[in-house]
Image (spheres, grey):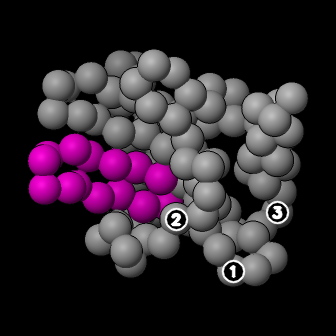
Amino acid sequence: MLQDRRKETIRALDESDRPHLYWHGVDGDGHVWLFETVIDSGGEYWPVRHAELGSDGVARRYSWNHIEDEHGFLAEGPIYPGDFGLNSLTFEEFETLWAALSGR
């Protein structure tokens, strides 16, 4: 299945020793975005974890073990942080925000 291959590919990137970078941003509608990306061999930033807090106050989190649901999905291609006005985070900052969006 295509979904299974996608999951395996994302998991392999996430578990690789390639650089992981962390990002956050807020769009014009007040949505808060978090991304953990892995740089592939071509220098592109592939999301391996993505969280968002919508204007409805509902937090949504996606990763290789929860790729999509009725509200959204983990990006299917590389992202370009500069195109979205994303700002970098440290690993610790990202983990704190990721945990906060899980309600823990």
Q: Which residue in the structure is indicated by mark 2?
A: 79
Residue 3: % across, % down: 76, 32
Main SS of the magenta segment?
strand
Question: Who's the residue at 35% across and 39% down the image?
Answer: 52
Determine crowd level at label 3: few under 14, some 14-19, many 20+ residues with C-alpha closer than 10 A: few
The span from disc 1 to disc 3 (Cα, nearest Å) is 14 Å
Residue 75's disc is none
Q: Secondary structure at mark 2?
A: loop
Q: Is residue 10 visible?
A: yes
Label 1, on which residue? 43
Residue at 17% x, 25% y is 56
What number of labels is visible?
3
Observer able to see residue 20: no
Q: Which residue is mark 3?
A: 17
Label 2, label 3: how many angstroms apart (C-alpha)? 19 Å
User: Label 3's element?
Assistant: loop
The magenta span reads: 22-35
Q: CA distance from mark 2 to mark 1?
A: 11 Å
Q: Nearer the viewer, residue 77 or 16?
A: 77
Q: Residue furthest front?
A: 1
Q: Nearer the viewer, mark 2 or mark 3?
A: 2
Residue mark closest to the camera, 1 vs 3: 1
Query: Which residue is found at the position 49% from the left and 60% from the top?
Result: 22
Residue drawn 34% across the image and 49% down it: 33
What is the three-letter code of the residue carrying label 3?
Answer: Asp
96 versus 89 height, above or below: above
Could you say where residue 17 lies in the image, as x and y percent from the top left? 82, 63
Quarter residue 51 falls in: top left
Name the quadrant containing residue 8: top right
Q: Is residue 26 found inside the magenta-colored segment of the image?
A: yes
